Image (cartoon, rainbow, N blue to C red):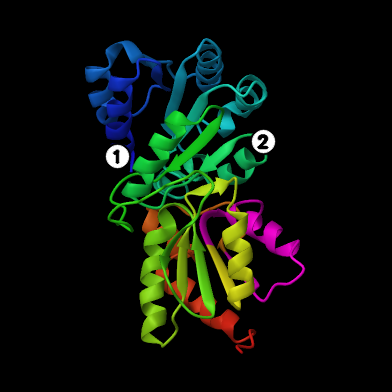
Amino acid sequence: MRDTFVKTLVELAKNNPQIELVTGDLGFGVLKPFWEQCPDQFTNAGIAEQNMTSMAAGMALEGKIVFTYSIGNFPTLRCLEQIRNDCAYHKANVKIVCIGGGFVYGSLGMSHQATEDLAILRALPDVVVMAPGDLVEAEACTKALAKYSGTAYLRLGRGGEKSIHKKLDNFQIGKAIKVKEGEKIAIFSTGAIFEEVQEATDLLIRKEYNPAIYTFPTVKPIDKDTIEKAAKRYQLIVTCEEHNIIAGFGSAVAEIIAEMKDKRASLLKIGVNDEYSVKVGNQKYLRQQYGMDAKSIEKRIIEELQNVSFI
């Protein structure tokens, strides 16, 4: 995803001198194409994410479209006050980009595991929160945010994500995308965890279940219309996120369903169960340890179906 983001941003910046990229002293191997092709639109702010964010806000208030870039929690939780006070409050045109959402940097320990970022950033008023599920969505999100006027957060994986779409027509911020039709069960996914959802769906199909799949590249504003229609149509909605189940994507879906007067579906949220990872390992290992790999998703859904009366 990060290579797709950089490639897309380079093309946008070459055609728009107002676009600026600011890094917190990270990603040079990946960002090299940008600074080589757009050297006057690139700044290294150093390992000083608070300063980076305040500087980005100032640049944005002078008319720039600024993308800040770092890994894990560094461009978000480390400088949350600056995002809130300098960017969001002023509706500054700053796009905060996190590479390595979830357990991507799991081998570096919990300090590098971004598992609360969606919840915290979506709590800030007027901040758009996006988490693409594949390379096509990553490109579409980058283009959409470059056009969007205001503060936004783009949460990316790292690399090697599987493809969901061949192409996307009429991509819009705030709209979910139906990947697959299905019956009785709908699986909602945000971010790179989709690769596990896809594999879990294949396992469920072998056991004669036929879940529908929707991907949500936008967590905020959430696609209320799609959620409400699904809650009336399906009997079980499952949300999957590589993130704490508290206040994240699943909670955003739950908030919509809870206010519905006529709903059919029950809800199952799959993610990190409100805990920090005390284990160290690569992303695949930690997904297995915390119940977010394909087999765990399949198992949780089948267990939940025992409590759902299908009509």
Q: Is residue 38 left or right of residue 238?
A: left
Choose between 56 and 71: the one closer to the eye.
56
What x and y, as percent, mark residue 102?
A: 47, 49
Whether 135 is drawn above or below 19: the answer is: below
Kind of element beneath mark 2: loop
Choose between 36 and 279: the one closer to the eye.
36
Q: Is residue 144 magenta?
A: no
What x and y, as percent, mark residue 112?
A: 47, 40
Picture quarter with the C terminus: bottom right
Residue type indicated by callout 2: Leu
Q: Is residue 272 left or right of residue 261?
A: left
Picture quarter with the N terminus: top left
Label 2: which residue?
A: 124
Whether 282 is drawn above or below 199: the answer is: above
Whether 41 is drawn above or below 236: the answer is: above
Density class for disc 2 (Cα within 10 Å; few <14, some 14-19, many ≥20) is some
Q: CA distance from mark 2 to mark 1?
A: 27 Å
Residue type indicated by callout 1: Thr
- The answer to whether residue 204 is seen in the rendering is yes
- Contact between marks 2 and 1 (CB within 8 A): the answer is no
Q: Earlier in the sequence, mark 2 or mark 1?
A: 1
Range covered by the magenta-colored residues: 240-269
Q: Residue at x 41, y 87 (%)?
A: 207
Kind of element beneath mark 1: helix
Q: Is residue 254 magenta?
A: yes
Q: Residue at x 58, y 21 (%)?
A: 92
Label 1: which residue?
A: 4
Density class for disc 1 (Cα within 10 Å; few <14, some 14-19, many ≥20) is some
